[in-house]
Amino acid sequence: MATELSWVVESRVMRIQYIDDVTMSELQAVMDQAADILLSDEESLEIHTIADMSKMKSLPSNLAQLGSMMSIFKHVRGVIVMVVPERNSLMRFLASYASKMTAKKARMLTAFSFEEAISLLQERDPQLQLTF
């Protein structure tokens, strides 16, 4: 499978990894899984999300479909960090596009590595006590 959802910190920091060539059905499946978690309890603590695209080689190019899948981010209350390859202009564009799809209560950031994403989250939420 070209996508994987896991916890960096249980119930607080979710990591979605996109690996190699990601199909629309794989993308939809992981976004549905993330939606189930993010929308399960609106009164819970903020859940931060790291969307790690650093190992992704390709993804579907239909922006309308991608945009509709990213609508889940409108409901996120935490920080979203998009990890993109520094030299991949398409991935950087998609991160910018995704940031426009987020709600005002969520904050979208871009990082060039998983380690940088962890540092950004730690700066914004010191209670997480993330270590590497």
Image (spheres, grey):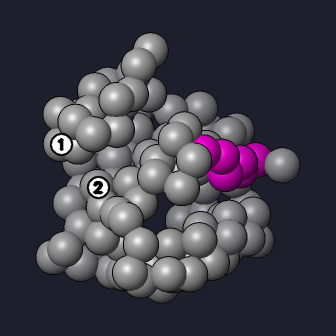
| Residue contact at pointers 1 and 2, CB within 8 angstroms | yes
- Magenta-highlighted stretch: main secondary structure? strand
Q: Is residue 132 magenta?
A: no
Residue 8 occupies quadrant: top right
Magenta residues (range):
2-7
**For residue 79, which numbered disc appears in the image?**
2
Image coordinates for residue 10, horizontal then vertical, percent: 57, 47
In the image shown, does 18 or 38 lie closer to the viewer?
38
Image quarter of the C terminus: top left
Residue 21 horizontal/vertical position (percent): 71, 46
Name which residue type carries label 2.
Val
* Nearer the observer, 123 or 74: 123
Q: Nearer the viewer, residue 121 or 46?
A: 46
Query: Which residue is found at the position 37% from the left and 46% from the top?
Result: 82
**What's the amino acid at mark 1?**
Arg
Sequence-first tag of 1 and 2: 2
Percent position of residue 67, x then y: 43, 78
Q: Is residue 126 above or below residue 130?
A: below
Task: Confirm whether the magenta stretch covers residue 3.
Answer: yes
Residue hosting label 1: 124
Q: CA distance from mark 1 to mark 2?
A: 8 Å
